[in-house]
Amino acid sequence: MTGRPTVVVIGAGFAGLAACRELVSAPVDIVLVDRHNFSTFQPLLYQVATGGLNPGDIAYPVRSYVRKHPNLTFRQETVTAVDTESGKVEIADGELISFDYLIVAVGAATNYFGVPGAAESARAIYTMEDAVAVRDKLARSIERASSRGVQPGELTVVIVGGGATGVEMAGALAEMRRMQLATTYEGISASDVRVVLVEQQDRLLAPFAERLSAYAATALSQRGVEVRCDESVAEVTPEHVVLKSGEVIECGLVLWAAGVGPCSLAQALDVPKVKGRLAVDEDLRVSGHDNVFAIGDVAAAAATAPLPQLAQPAIQGGQHAAKQIRLLLASQPTQPFRYHDKGIMATIGRRSAVAEIFLGIKLKGTLAWMAWLGLHIVFLLGVRNRLSVILNWAWRYLSWRRVGRVIVGN
Ligand SMILES: Cc1cc2nc3c(=O)[nH]c(=O)nc-3n(C[C@H](O)[C@H](O)[C@H](O)COP(=O)(O)OP(=O)(O)OC[C@H]3O[C@@H](n4cnc5c(N)ncnc54)[C@H](O)[C@@H]3O)c2cc1C
């Protein structure tokens, strides 16, 4: 009980942590709530799923940051409801946490778009649990095929969605097949492993320039990935996928990278929405609520085109919301949020990536790959994680050695 206003921040992802960083020097008490006690660096989840990185390399323990700031406390809890009228959030066991200001930064969730069987039989790569489950499933199939002989379709992976996540996952699997499986597991040859990437638009990486999309498609095809554009998945079962064209692909694993939708808390909140995301005014306050902000993937502007669900809008939104709380505390008017687009990038594999950066500069190949490696190191949280990722990448890209996937699940 310090007498200072309490700011509750729900979500310790890119957006929530950026808000906390800006608020720790303000005259407030901050309560950060997340269902996990770590922050996940989602852009590298696919490398955990393919065994290239360890889960700990891309997980930043929230308490490493919290312990440095006396006005910041952390609760590992799942928020189940928010009462904006009384200024309280409810956590899973019914306990209420009061707030003067609230920042909702709970991200998004996998969207299966109602495709029959997808939620039950496809795997997402949205959380650390997802990535570890995919890694275990892949490793288990490979071990079984190596010891008992490859069954039809057993080592076929169908990736649904040709955005950055789908392309990166396809590239990583192609590299794993080409350079590692056949040399590590007896009884398995590269031709036993099939990677199919399905995209319903007429090109991969739709937000990128057409020539970068074309480069990505060619680079994947050269690595043996079957790229199917203008195609979509009509049904998923545990043994196969059915494409819209009627083709049936027998497969051991379906990876769902086709898009995101609102998470359960966003769905439960009784506030204005834009396509399931919380509608915010230009200062990032939830429309109609003076002391509630929504930032990152969970939020969308009510009046203008929604920002892409990427790390930079989340980080910049977090900083902006925190600054608005400072202004409100000083009885000053809030300011509109202006997003500074720093570009987009996606990697296909070793010495192959695409990037669109400032001044409209477009890069592909080795230069884009070096930029991709550098930026991901810079944005990773924690010195230990950066060193660990650098060591893992150096080991992998210089020696190609990453033998044997470890299975940790049951
Ligand atoms: C596989 C993948 C690859 C990506 N690659 C890129 C990329 O290359 N470049 C890029 O810019 N962006 C990328 N993104 C998108 C980027 O990661 C997101 O836009 C960004 O993480 C959004 O930040 P956020 O803080 O809004 O949400 P998140 O980072 O998702 O954080 C939300 C937090 O809220 C917590 N939470 C959720 N619900 C509750 C609840 N009810 N109670 C308590 N806590 C809760 C979660 O545990 C989580 O920690 C990728 C995303 C994925 C999934």
Image: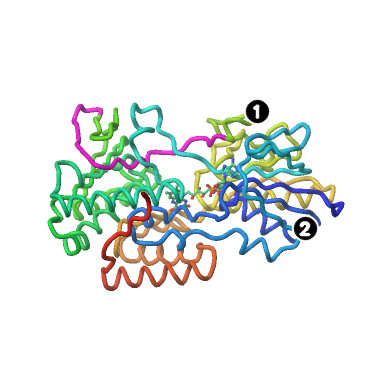
As drawn, is 56 to the left or to the right of 97? left
- In this orientation, which residue lies closer to the viewer: 156 or 344? 156
Query: Would you call the spot at circle 1 few (<14 residues within 10 Å), some (14-19), or many (20 or more)?
Result: few
Q: At x 25% / y 44%, what residue is drawn? A: 157
Q: Position of residue 261 (x, y in %)?
A: 48, 35
Q: Position of residue 115 (x, y in %)?
A: 35, 28
Q: Position of residue 85 (x, y in %)?
A: 77, 31
Mark 2, secondary structure of its residue: loop
Real-space CA distance between mark 1 and mark 2, rounded to the nearest whole angstrom: 29 Å
- In this orientation, which residue lies closer to the viewer: 100 or 408? 408
Q: Quadrant of residue 234?
A: top left
Mark closer to the chain start, 1 or 2? 2
User: Which residue, as the protein is rendered here, is positioned at the far right?
Assistant: 3
**Colour scheme used in the picture?**
rainbow
Query: Would you call the spot at circle 2 few (<14 residues within 10 Å), some (14-19), or many (20 or more)?
Result: some
Q: At x 74% / y 42%, what residue is drawn? A: 97
Q: Quadrant of residue 176?
A: bottom left
**Which residue carries the number 2 mark?**
26
**Extent of the magenta region:** 244-264
Which amino acid does the dot numbered 2 rest on? Ala
Which amino acid does the dot numbered 1 rest on? Asp
- On residue 270, which mark appears? 1
Q: Position of residue 200 (x, y in %)?
A: 31, 35
Would residue 23 be counted in the magenta stretch?
Answer: no
Q: At x 43% / y 58%, what residue is drawn? A: 55
Q: At x 44% / y 55%, what residue is drawn? A: 360
- On residue 27, which mark appears? none
